[in-house]
């Protein structure tokens, strides 16, 4: 069964995601303390969305856009601040939005990056691949909900 799974588009997509992530230093090393993303994330976002389609993950998004992802990395505002200045423009930020972009960033960095790592893919075997598949689908379903909510 595992040998058949390794021939599927879903399995190949895991490697495409890892390759896209590993090919860009900023994407590869992004962490919770990152305050902005500047490189082109098109490839990794495309591969993540392709996984959603290939694995038939329930979703409402039509793509994953860097402009939306970028706002997840804005610095978390202190409690006494209610606006963010970005590129010379002041934007009001509600407490809920402040928490939302922090939670989305954490999910991306701590869940998705961890699950779609070269180590995780290399450790797949006949005993664990079904659970891995299930976890990835659940994770990306949750991610899509967070992304769509954040986008609004």
Image (cartoon, rainbow, N blue to C red):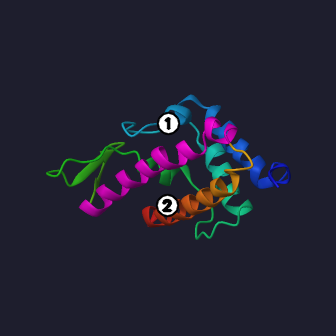
Give the label on residue 20, or none: none
Foreground: 119 or 45?
119
Q: Quadrant of residue 8?
A: bottom right
Sequence-wise, the earlier of marks 2 and 1 is 1
Foreground: 51 or 74?
51
In the figure, 31 relative to 74: above or below? above
Q: Residue at x 70, y 56 (%)?
A: 50
> Label 1: how many residues lie within 10 Å, few (<14), some (14-19) or many (20+)?
few
In the figure, 35 relative to 129: above or below? above
In the figure, 55 relative to 85: above or below? below
Q: Which residue is mark 1?
A: 38
Relative image position of residue 29 (x, y in whole percent): 50, 32
Relative image position of residue 27 (x, y in whole percent): 55, 36
Relative image position of residue 23 (x, y in whole percent): 65, 31
Q: Residue at x 63, y 33 (%)?
A: 22
Q: Residue 59 in magenta?
A: no
Q: Which residue is mark 2?
A: 147
Q: Quadrant of the N terminus?
A: bottom right
Q: Which residues are magenta?
A: 95-123
């Amino acid at each position: 069964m595992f040998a058949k799974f390794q021939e599927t588009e879903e399995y190949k997509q895991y490697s495409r995601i890892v390759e896209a992530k590993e090919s860009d230093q900023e994407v590869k090393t992004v962490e919770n303390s990152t305050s902005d993303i500047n490189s082109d994330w098109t490839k990794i976002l495309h591969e993540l969305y392709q996984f959603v389609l290939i694995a038939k993950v329930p979703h409402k998004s039509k793509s994953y856009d860097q402009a939306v992802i970028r706002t997840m990395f804005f610095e978390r505002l202190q409690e006494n601040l209610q606006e963010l200045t970005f590129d010379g423009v002041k934007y009001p930020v509600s407490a809920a939005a402040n928490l939302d972009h922090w939670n989305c960033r954490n999910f991306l960095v701590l869940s998705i990056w961890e699950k779609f790592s070269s180590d995780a893919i290399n450790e797949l075997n006949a005993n664990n691949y079904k659970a891995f598949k299930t976890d990835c689908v659940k994770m990306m379903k949750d991610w899509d909900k967070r992304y769509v909510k954040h986008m609004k």
